Amino acid sequence: MLIEISPLWIVIVNCAGITAAHLGIGFWSMRRALAAFDPQTFPYRPADWENSGKVYRTFFRIHLWKIILPDGARWFDGFSKSKLRSTDPTYLRQFILETCRGEQSHWLQFLVILTFIAWTPFPASLAIISYAAISNVPCIMNLRQIRFRLQILLGKKSR
């Protein structure tokens, strides 16, 4: 623990701060222009081990649990990623960019929430680390596998 504060204040700061981190970063991300995102650049482009997103279906079995993940964009009047509404190439390109936006938001939330361990004593800091991972990593995985599938579909539509 790097910063010493009372247990009551740790609970208050963590509850308020983590909520603010989720909402603030989500709101900020929704206000960024789509031109700021390029699915062909790091960190959005696929890594070799992801096998064009197949690893998420075969190893992580994402198709069995992705339905329980919330789509936070709806909370900010954003682009819904819960269903594919069209196969029009313009729509698919926007959907791909929106997955980049969502992924960035979750990476930032994950990293910011991890800073809360600076004042949270062990073993409670493990709860913060676990929460940061559980609330963001599944969403990142889902957004990545959706993007890779959409890129394949867009490639087929372009031929």
Image (cartoon, rainbow, N blue to C red):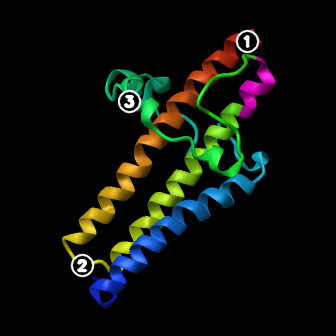
Nearer the camera: disc 2 or disc 1: 2
Tell me the CA gap for discs 2 and 1: 53 Å
Is residue 44 visible in the rendered structure shown here? Answer: yes
Q: Percent from the top left, x then y, of residue 2?
A: 32, 85
Q: Which residue is mark 3?
A: 65
- Using the image, determine if residue 109 lies above or below residue 66: below
Q: Which mark is residue 157?
A: 1
The part of the image, by quadrant, that contains residue 93 is top right
- Using the image, determine if residue 18 lies above or below residue 13: above
- Using the image, determine if residue 80 lies above or below residue 150: below
Q: Of helix, strand and loop, which one carries label 1?
A: helix
Residue occupying image coordinates x 24% and y 64%: 126
Tell me the CA gap for discs 3 and 1: 28 Å
As rendered, which of 48 and 116 lies closer to the eye? 116
Q: Please, what is the three-letter code of the amino acid marked with disc 1? A: Lys
Q: Please, what is the three-letter code of the amino acid marked with disc 2? A: Pro
Q: Percent from the top left, x then y, of residue 19?
A: 49, 65
Q: Residues in magenta?
A: 88-94
93 inside magenta stretch: yes
Could you tell me if the residues under marks 2 and 1 are in contact, i.e. CB atoms within 8 Å?
Answer: no
Closer to the chain start, of discs 3 and 2, is 3
